[in-house]
Image (spheres, grey):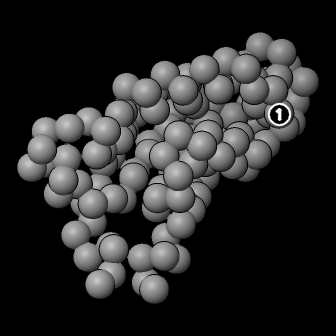
C-alpha cells in the first residue's frame, strides 16, 4: 500500500524573518526582510484521531527554528538560504515532502520596487512512486 494515499498538508504562511543575505555587503551587514511559506505533506489521520502532536508537525517548533536560523545566517544568495531552511526542516521531521517559498521583500535594485521569490521542494518525488 502506498504510504502517501492519505496525505494532508500543513501550511505555515507569512513567517516574517530578518536575515543577512545578499550579494551586496550592506545586505549581509544590515540584513533585510524576508517572508517564508512552508508546506508539509504528511498523513494526519493518526494525529486527527488520537489528538497527539507527536503524530503531526509542531508548527511552533518550525517557526522558532527558522527564526533562529535567520538570525544566524550570513550568505550571498536566497538559493543558499532556502537550502539551509530545507536542511533544517528535514533535520526536525525527516524526509517528508516539504515545499517552501522564500520571498526577499525589497531587493536593493535601482528602479525596482517588487520582490524576488524562490520556491523549492524536497521529497516530492516519493509521492509519485
Q: Residue furthest left?
A: 49
Decide: is 24 above or below 78: above
Judge whether residue 85 can be spotted in this image.
no
Dot 1 falls on a residue whose secondary structure is: strand
Tell me which corner region of the image, top left, top right, bottom left or bottom right, holds residue 5. bottom left
Q: Position of residue 100 (x, y in %)?
A: 51, 50
At horizontal 46% and vertical 58% (from top left) the residue drawn is 96
Residue drawn where x is 73% and y is 20% of the image = 72
Side of 18 relative to 126 (left or right): right
> Which residue is nearer to you in this view: 15 or 30?
15
Q: Residue furthest top?
A: 30
- Residue underneath mark 1: 75
* Residue 95 visible: yes
**Dot 1: within a 10 Å radius of its alpha carbon, few (fewer than 14), some, or many (20 or more) residues?**
some
Task: Tell me the quarter of the image containing the N terminus.
Answer: bottom left
Is residue 99 left or right of 80 when viewed as pictured? left
Spot occupied by residue 121 in the image (x, y as percentages of width and height): 55, 61
Query: Going 52% across and 77% down the picture, which residue do you hit?
Result: 125
Residue 13 x, y percent position in the rendering: 36, 38
3 versus 40 height, above or below:
below
Amino acid at each position: 500500500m502506498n504510504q502517501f494515499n492519505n496525505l494532508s498538508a500543513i501550511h505555515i504562511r507569512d513567517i516574517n524573518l530578518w536575515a543577512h543575505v545578499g550579494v551586496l555587503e550592506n545586505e549581509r551587514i544590515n540584513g533585510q526582510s524576508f517572508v517564508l511559506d512552508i508546506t508539509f505533506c504528511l498523513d494526519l489521520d493518526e494525529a486527527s484521531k488520537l489528538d497527539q502532536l507527536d503524530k503531526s508537525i509542531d508548527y511552533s517548533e518550525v517557526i522558532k527554528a527558522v527564526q533562529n536560523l535567520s538570525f544566524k545566517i550570513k550568505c550571498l544568495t536566497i538559493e543558499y538560504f532556502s537550502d539551509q531552511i530545507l536542511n533544517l526542516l528535514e533535520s526536525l521531521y525527516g524526509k517528508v515532502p516539504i515545499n517552501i517559498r522564500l520571498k526577499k521583500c525589497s531587493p536593493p535594485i535601482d528602479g525596482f520596487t517588487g520582490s524576488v521569490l524562490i520556491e523549492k521542494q524536497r521529497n516530492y518525488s516519493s509521492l509519485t512512486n
